[in-house]
Image (tube, rainbow, N blue to C red):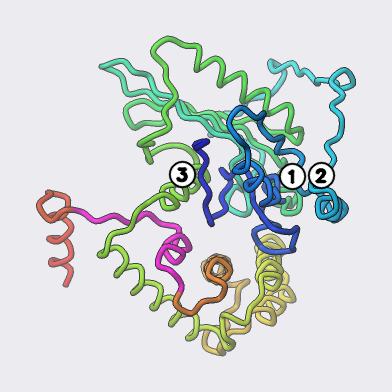
Amino acid sequence: EQQAHISYILTASTDYVLTTENVDSYKIRRAKQLGIPIVNIEYVYEYRRLSSGQSLIDINKFIIKSVADQENFIKTGTIPVAESRVNSIKINKFDLNKIKLWNSDDADLPRFDESTHCEIGKWAIFKEINDNSNVFFVLELQIIPEQYYDQTASDYRLRFRYEKQQQDKNVLIQYAFGNDPNELQQLFASYYYRLSSMPRIIRIRDKLPNQFGSKLLLRSLFTHRIDTQILDENVCQLIESLWLETIGDLNKILSISPESITLKTIIEAEAVLLKLKSTQDPAAALHFYSLIPHRPQYTIDLIKNRRVLIEKIDLCQMLRDMLTVNELTNWNVKAPIEAKYRALKCYIETIASSTSEYKNIAKLIQSST
């Protein structure tokens, strides 16, 4: 009735997380990392009990912030909301002209590791609607959560990214860096306002192109696509075969059952690999193999073989995905195909056999067999 959607999948675009209690689960921890408010499920029931003409319920009274708030809700049915102090709020204004902008090819470009634990805080894609033009603008605000910030890999926690692309060619990519969220949010807002105010420029939200933007944004957009996709039978069969093959590979590589590895162990193993990547400490390599035990033939020197080191980082991500699927399905052995599909983090669709694309792919496969 209110155009709201309830999903069992938690993403960075989620507005609220509904829960019966403030338990220490993966989704609750993830929501807190992303800054997503945790709301008591009673809010939904109270809203449903409203009769026509009644004023809307303040959702802030149902947001769970602490154990004390949870206990207060059980006793009184509400959570106290602090009085707003509009007059005491000080708005920090920045001189945006003093923020340094870097071109993507600058030799002294600050380091920013977007490949590990980095997240998209805000994004927007605009398009020029001229008939003879194919110009796109991409704005991104990228964030490394404080608990994952590593000064040896990144000079800053926040990065603003601006891209202008014409006819499938990157015309311009610029960055701004900082550690103050307010400063870069204002920079993002100024670019957003300037683009949205230009004639013949519109923001696009549907059928988003996938050939530009950072890898981080593309990954986020793909996640949104697979979260909302309806799977057909052919895709389901392919996913099931891929999943079974993956489980088999893990059992072949590891000397323990993958299901016995906890999220805490995976996070610690990822941290050890990141340390090993920057320090090449032999003790770190031994520590990793003690956390994620491998069979002898797959215990490879991670200092001499950097490619294998990257593969081990991917292995940790695979184990994390498996754990996510198990949590989503309450450790059901026969996990729903949708959960497995989302864990694969790729977009798969069926191509009609009558299309030229299908025929070209079939010809390529036949020529390689």
Residue 3 position within the rendered picture, expressed as x and y whole percent measured from the top left:
49, 37
**Quarter of the view holding residue 25:** bottom right
Mark 2 to mark 1: distance in Å? 6 Å
Q: Secondary structure at mark 3?
A: helix
Q: Say whether marks 2 and 1 touch (CB < 8 Å).
A: yes
Relative to residue 139, is residue 364 depicted above or below? Answer: below
Over which residues does the magenta segment extend? 335-351
Relative to residue 325, is residue 351 depicted above or below? Answer: above
- Identify the mark nearer the N-term, 1 or 3: 1
Relative to residue 276, is residue 230 depicted above or below? Answer: above
Q: Say whether marks 1 and 3 touch (CB < 8 Å).
A: no
Is the residue marked by circle 1 packed among few (<14), some (14-19), or many (20+) residues within 10 Å? many
Left or right? Give the position of 246 relative to 40.
left
Give the residue type at disc 1: Phe
Residue with the mark numbered 2: 79
Is the residue marked by circle 2 packed among few (<14), some (14-19), or many (20+) residues within 10 Å? many
Left or right? Give the position of 44 relative to 9.
right
Q: Say whether marks 3 and 2 touch (CB < 8 Å).
A: no
Mark 3 to mark 2: distance in Å? 35 Å
Q: What residue do we see at 41% from left, 47% from top?
A: 225
> In this orientation, which residue lies closer to the viewer: 21 or 366?
21
